[in-house]
Image: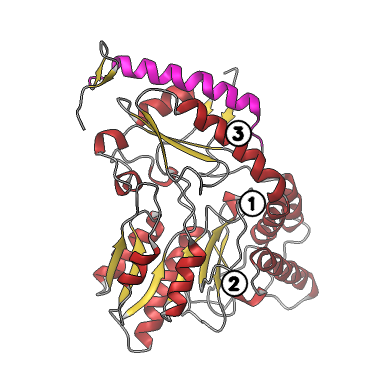
Amino acid sequence: MSHFIYADHAATTAVSDTALQAMLPHFTPAYGNPSSLYRFAQEGKTDLERARAEIAACLNARPEEIYFTSGGTEADNWALRGVAELMALKGRKGGHIITSAIEHHAVLHTAQYLEKQGYEVTYLPVDGRGLVDPAALEGAIRPDTILISIMAANNEIGTIEPVAELGRIARAHKVLFHTDAVQAVGHIPVDVEAWNVDLLSLSAHKFRGPKGVGALYVKKPLRLPALIQGGGQEKGRRSGTENVPGAVGMAAALREAVDGLSRESPRLAALRDRLIDGLTGLPYTRLTGDPVNRLPGTASFVFEGVEGEALLLHLDARGICASSGSACSSASLDPSHVLLAIGLPHAIAHGSLRLSLGAENTEADVDYILKEVPQVVAYLRELSPVWDRDAQKPTWEL
């Protein structure tokens, strides 16, 4: 393979050298269990708390508001299930939860689980750009609403939600507000105070940190019930021996990402816009997501008359790594729930392509993608039973 272009950074990223170097000592010379009392172990505890403080500073939070988890999925589960359990302990079991139709499955499936436990869930619709309407959120709040969970940025189409405004509405109604910020942290400025959030999820491997570590921000004085019972780590809320290398790597990667935002975001946005300009020029092709309020490195498209899975396989053969919908559910043949929620018909939603750029991508990478994608799309359309080869358009009338 003469080319290898990784354009799937929304799925995961390579660990930065800064993060790797920060982690390495904690695998061998400084491997002590931070819960032990002797000095050798307490050095690890010190580094763990430094990592917590660094992550908090990057979010404009306090160190005691950061709880380490195994990643974004665990953090989302803890936020929703933790609030539900907390309210049940206060005599409000079976309350009302509001989320959106385009959330990551870590939120959607948890909400569905809670429905089976007697909670009522409202799934707010989004417009054609993937945006939640603040007025619709305010109209959905009820006296028994216990939690609102709206993502900061969508993992498939890259749309950035008006989180601060949504948070203001939640706060005005005295309802707890959670945001899944897994795709946002390290890619756009994140400020838990300005965003008016009570809970925020993040995951290290989305911003060049290691896999298997994330965090949940919990605004004081909110105190969720324990997620895991055991040795009482994480202030008794999440037991289990702390992942010191992961936490240290996460902090180093996040600090590096935040410090580089003013330089890297415009660079990625320029590359992204070249992809958008080049690929939306193809017939029967459209950009999905908000054309302006979107993540700097993410561009998502649908190509009519093309199957997304076939598109990915042919691009892979040409050395391009991309995705069709979410990487967490890419084995599914069902069309993306996000694309259906923004109003795309099933037939068109099947032909999606997400290109998400990162630190190692270059102008030459974009040149190659812009050369190869149109060729693959044209080839697949010629083979497609739903493509009129004479008229050069889909056979359907939508």
The residue nearer to you, when weighing 246 against 398, is 398
The residue tagged with tag 2: helix, strand or loop?
Answer: loop
Q: Which callout, 1 or 2, points at the residue further toward the start of the chain?
A: 2
Q: What x and y, as percent, mark residue 341?
A: 31, 49
Residue 102 part of the magenta segment:
no
The reply to whether dot 1 and dot 2 touch (C-beta < 8 Å) is: no
Contact flag, marks 3 and 2 (Cβ < 8 Å) = no
Q: Residue at x 56, y 77 (%)?
A: 219
Alpha carbon separation for disc pair 1 and 2: 24 Å
Whether pointer 3 and pointer 1 mark residues with C-beta atoms closer than 8 Å, the reply is no
Q: What's under tag 3, amino acid-wise?
A: Leu
Looking at the rendering, the stretch of residues picked out in magenta corresponds to 360-385
Residue 380 belongs to the span the image colors magenta? yes
Element at label 1: loop
Asked which secondary structure carries label 3, the reply is: helix
Q: Where's the N terminus, which quadrant?
A: top right
Q: Which mark is residue 193?
A: 2
Crowding near the residue tagged with mark 3, few <14, some 14–19, many ≥20 C-alpha atoms within 10 Å: many
**Which residue was labeled with disc 3?**
271
| Residue indicated by mark 1 | 209
Name the amino acid type tagged 1.
Gly
For this orientation, the residue located farthest to the top is: 390
1 vs 2, front mark = 2
Q: Nearer the viewer, residue 32 or 6?
A: 6
Q: Nearer the viewer, residue 41 or 221?
A: 221
Q: Where is residue 54 in the image (x, y as percent from the top left)?
A: 71, 65
- Amino acid at circle 2: Glu
Q: Is residue 85 above or below residue 27?
A: below
Measured as percent of width and height from the top left, residue 64 is found at 64, 77
Left or right of residue 17: residue 271: left
Q: Residues within 10 Å of mark 2 (few under 14, many from 20)?
A: some
> Mark 2 or mark 3, which is nearer the start of the sequence?
2
